[in-house]
Structure formats: C-alpha cells, structure tokens
Amino acid sequence: MPRFSIIVPVFKVQGFLRECLDSVLGQSYTDVEVIAVDDRSPDGCPAILDSYAERDARVRVLHLPENVGLGRARNAGLAEASGDYVLFLDSDDFYTPGLLEAVAARLAATGDPDILVFDHVRTHWWGRGGRSTAADLLAKGAAAGTFDVRENPEYLHLFLVAWNKAYRRDFFLKHELSYAPGLYEDAPVTYRSMVLADRIACLERIGVEYRQRRQGAITKTPGRRHFDIFAQYEGLFTFLEGRPDLAWARPLLFERALDHMLFVLAREDRVTPADRADFHREIRAFHARYLPEGFTPPAGRRGTEMRLLAAAPYPPYALVRGLRELRTVAGAGKRRVTGAVSRRAQGAWYAVRSALPLDPHLAVYSAFSHRGVLGDPAAIHAKAAEIAPDLESVWVVREEEAHSLPAGIDHVTPGSRRYHEVMARATYWVNNVNWPGTLAKRAGSVHIHTHQGTPLKYMGADLLTKPGARHGFDVPKMLRRADRWDFSLVANRHSELVWERAYPCHFTSLRSGSPRNDALVNAGPEATGAARARLGVPDGHTVVLYAPTRREYRRGGHVDRIDLARFARDLGAGHTLVVRLHPSLATGTARGMGLTELHRRGVLIDATDEPHVEEVLLAADVLVTDYSALMFDYANLDRPIVVHADDWAAYTASRGAYFDIAAEAPGHVSRSYRELAWLLTSGAWQDEESARLRRGFRERFCEFDDGLAAERVVRTLMLGEPMPQVPSGSLDEVT
C-alpha cells in the first residue's frame, strides 16, 4: 500500500496534462500511486496517460466508457485507490516541488489526522498571483497542531476545493463521502468532511498552482449550469437532517451556503443578468426551507443581504447592492479629493520651511524605501555617531516599520509635519534608493547615494532596452531624481563605469568602498561565531547559504529553481542550509512555497527577515546564489561561492547583465540541480580551482573595500577632512 493515492480526473487538457503529471511524479517523495481517470477525453489525453503508465509503474489509467463529469470521475478513481491518504488534483493544475514530502512530514508530526489542508496560489495565463486569502488562517492552524471545526468554526472559511487537502482514506470511506454530479461538487464534500472530522491539521505551504485558464473554465462561463449549486447544498442539508448529532453545524453551514450562493449571484461571469432574478428566487427558497432556528446573520454587507432574503424579492437586493457600489465609488472620489488637499498643504509647509537656512549639523537617512536602519546608510550613520557626534541624525521610516527601530533612533514618518521640516533643512542626505520626487535639492545640501551593491543586472537608463524589466519604472523620472545626487559611492571600477553609464547625471563617483562591507572586511572569528549563534546553527556544522534573486520574466519575481527540502537532505549530516530570499520576495508567495514550513520543521533556516544581511553572510561557509549582488559582498570574506546559473540565458534576455557571470564567476558554476548537488557533496566547492576563480573575482570587485568605507564617507563628505586612507588607484582627495 502506498502512502498517497493521487487521483487525477482528465478531460480536454492535453496542453497541460504533462506538466500536471510531471509535478507529481517528479516529487522527492515517491511512495505514491497516481490514478489517472480518463473521463472519455476526446483529445490526445488518453494517449498521453497511456505513455506515462508505460514509463512509470506508479501510474494507473482508468478509461471510462462515457463522460461522467469531474465529481464522478473522482469517485471512480477513489474506488481504485489503495493509499493511506487520498489527494485529488485537477489535471490542468500542478504541484509545487517538495509538497508531498512536506505533507508526509506534517501528517507524521500530527499523528495522521483525518484531514490535512494546505495552501495554493492562482497561476494566471499572464503570471502567478499573490498569497491566497487562506494564508493567515493556515499559518494559525499550522501552529495549533490539530483541531476540529466545532471549536474552531473559522476554518470553514478555507477554500472550497477538493485539491487542497489530503484525506485519510479510511475516514473518507467510513463516512461514505463521494462527489455528486454537476458544478460546485466540492462544497458538500468539503463541508461534510470538515464537520465530521475529529482531527484536522494545516500545512503552511503553497502546494498547488491553481491554473486560471484564459478560456474554457466552466465556473467562469455564464449560464444555467450555475444553478447546480442549489442541488449541491440541498444534498448537504438533507444529510444534516438525518444527523441530529451535527445540529451544532447547521447554522455554521447555513451561513456558508448563503454566502457562497450570494457570491455566485454577484459574479457576472457566472449568472447572466437575465437569470439573476431566478437565481435570487432560488436562494430565497433555500433560505426558507433550511433556515435553522435562532440563526443570526453575520455583521456587514453580507449579513444585510442575508436578512433581505427573509422578506425581500430581487429588486430590493439589487437596489441595496447598487447603492453600496455607488457609495464605494463616491468614497474613493472623496478620498482622492482629501488626499489632494492634504498633499497641497504639506507642499506649502515644506516650501515655508525651505525658506529657512540649511542646518549644517542635520543629516537625514533612509534605506530600501524607508524600511528601517539598514544597509550602507546604516553603516554611515553608525560611523557618524562615533566620529561626528555633533551631527544630528534623523531617519525616514515608514510608520509600520517604526516599532522595529533600534533604541535611541530619532525618526520621522513620510508625509508628517516634522518630516517636511527635516527634509527642508537637512544638509546631508544619505540613501540607497532615490528620494521622492516631491523633495527639492537645495543649494548647499549634499546628497550621497550609496546604491545597493555592485551591479550585475542592468540598471537605470540601461533598462530602456529591456521593456519587461522596466515595467512599472519611469526611467526618465528616475534619472531626474538621480540628478540630485552629489556623490555616488563605488566599491570597484566596474561599478564606477556602470553607474556613470546607467545614471548619466552630474554626480561625482567616490571610490569609498561599500560602507556595509566594513563589517565583513573587519570581522574576526568571534563575529562569525556570534552570527551563527543568532541564527541557531549547531556547533561544528558547515553552513550553506542559498540566496536567489528575483526574476523579471516571471510575474511576482519568484521562480522555484530547486527543491529546498531535497537540497537540505542531499547536503547530509553536519550541514545547515540557510535561505535568504531577495527583499522584494519576502512578503509574496515565495515564502509559502515551502520555506516557512521547512523552517518550522527545522529542515533549514529561513533568514529572509534577518534585518542585517552582513550577519547572515558572516555565518556562511559557502554561498550558493544565482545572480544576486550578495556575491560581490560575500567575496570580501574570501570564502567559497557557487553560482547556480541554470536559467542564465532567460535571465539575461529579460533583465540584461553587464558581464557573463557564468564565464567570469567567483567559483564553480552549476547548470542543473544535479551539478549543484555534486559540487556541494563532493567537496569540489572548496577546491583549488574554486580558490583561483575567487582570487581573480576579489581583485576585480573588492578593489576599494578596505574596512574604512564608512569612515571615509563621514570624514570626507560630512566633516570636510581628507580621506584617512586612499585605496590604490582611487581619487587623491575629495573634499
């Protein structure tokens, strides 16, 4: 008996079927059987299924004699299943890497619950969507262990589908659960199973890429078929009438049923205008027939709609909904007017304060669009506090980030009255991104732009040749803001040339080194030990840091290059895998693709939220990255680097690169996961060839990093003193 039976109903999906099957059969967890049910598909699906069955003994194909629809095709597969757990997967969707291993681990950790629920992400024909609405609820459930919905009814709000769950097969059979014909067949099975289950568990992980097809999706085709929803819920409530022990569930499920029906009614891609009155009449009939005693509608607009069902026909409902939509539009207009007035008032106050003299002792800092005390600006600020105590330092920080500031940091929030006072009078401006365009550069002020590391990918004006990469960026506006720069900090000549090309403005390049890299250049063994202790790395472990960058050729920026669970396992005992995502991916779907769940299980360490990346770099024995600028910083530690360049051609085509990192690499280059695993497990990552490549890379890109960069910036640009030390080949003096 396999651990998992994966049931895949198949009908007219020949363009997607191989990706679906490959996503299952390519999982690192292999104790599965795949029961593919050919629902009399008229295209090439039957032949595709037979070819997979010939190649892989885990695949069994059922060719049904007639088309029976999605629900009954699932039932046919269920009758043939032999696994401990049953999972359903629609044949135009696909699993994310490592899902089944994560499911198996979670089931073991929670003692084989009746149901395990995991997350999904909508994958549109134009790219991947964002986090699902269930993400926070699943995170809460994952922390709780197991539960039942009688004590935790909020879990009835989880997505109503078959394919986001693993059902214990004996539980499914014991309660004679099966799918009815017609649309919305998932609803009664989902709700019935949830109220019957004694133990439910959650997995905080995106397991399914839910494909949103541009055409052909049945649930998005308007017509009378959407009236099937009433038969589905009538079947559920008929079941409940025969189960007095489930009387507690009737009000909960009644509210869920009405919510679902009203949701469908409001969708123009489901119920046509001509059918809406009839559909509303059916909802009212359901309401009258199954209304539980003492039912109280929820608060808010949906509750108002439910209360109307008791007495009002369709026209009052339509009127209420229309008025609400009108108020929404009007409210948005009012907010726009209020916002415009507020901005004009702020601008007037800024102009008044700008008439006063600059404060020669005031410096303002920001990093990563006001995210906190971070990066090069933070290093400069710390050194200024040490050697220029007469300078008043103020940080610009978003309101939601203010709670995480270190003690004693003076700060303002963007748009506040004091923000405009500070920005109007500050002499020194330090940032690693552009300041807002509403702020004017005053004569005598000094704008110091630190950048965010050495550039590999195209930046600034060079993005004009890459329309996909510059999507959402106004390059001319970006350059107008860069016209305010006085000094551009560089760590090497490569950066100096690139910045002068990418930002054709009137700044001076200062060969200062990268201030944030002072911590790496000056670090001793004790700093490495402290960094490992903060991350929770066991003593004696070899730390492999994996730091992928974002991809412009994929909406959302994240592409799963490797199966992290498999990578951690292949590294073997005595190794700790640490993962650091690009900051722009920290709040997107990338964390849900297994990273959060693997961190919770102790398979790896997720260091994405560590505020100071320098400390994460210090903890690592080897860096594995693709095209992240972190490799230039990490090279200062003179530790091995492996470049995983399996999609280099696609990356350069979409984003552009200033040189071929695969040909001028800081260490060995892998072109596939197999090569990457071999480099790490064979020890080749730290051989003589690796050291030779790294030596040449360091000479080129760590040229001006001498551990004195922050001091050089403060003394030269803020105090007007000569540089304490000038790296070879740098400017003689800048004052």
Image: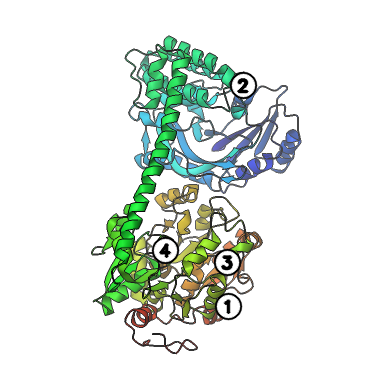
Q: CA distance from mark 3 to mark 1?
A: 31 Å
Whole-angstrom CA distance, mark 2 to mark 3, is 50 Å
**Total numbered labels:** 4
* C-alpha gap between disc 1 and disc 2: 64 Å
Q: Position of residue 265 (x, y in %)?
A: 51, 22
Q: Amino acid at mark 4?
A: Trp
In the picture shown, does residue 576 fall above or below 183?
Answer: below
Q: Is 640 above or below relative to 605? A: below
Q: Kindly tell me whether residue 111 is visible in this rendering.
A: no
- Using the rendered view, name the quadrant where residue 407 is placed: bottom left
Q: Residue at x 37, y 83 (%)?
A: 716
Q: Which residue is mark 1?
A: 693
Around disc 2, counting alpha carbons within 10 Å, would you say few (fewer than 14), some (14 to 19), or many (20 or more)?
Answer: some
Pointers 1 and 4 in contact (C-beta within 8 Å): no
Residue that label 3 marks = 461
Q: Nearer the viewer, residue 486 or 21?
A: 486
Mark in front: 2 vs 3: 3
Is residue 526 depicted above or below 261 in this figure?
below
Q: Which mark is residue 223?
A: 2
Q: Nearer the viewer, mark 3 or mark 1?
A: 3
Q: Which mark is residue 435?
A: 4
Marks 1 and 2: which is nearer the front?
2
Q: How dense is the environment of label 4, judged by Cα within 10 Å: few (below 14), some, or many (20 and up)?
A: many
The crowding category of the residue bearing disc 1, from other C-alpha atoms within 10 Å (few below 14, some 14 to 19, many at least 20), is some
Mark positioned earlier in the residue sequence (3 or 1): 3
Question: Residue 513, labelled with which disc?
Answer: none
Amino acid at dot 2: Gly
Instruction: Say what secondary structure mark 4 lies in.
Output: loop
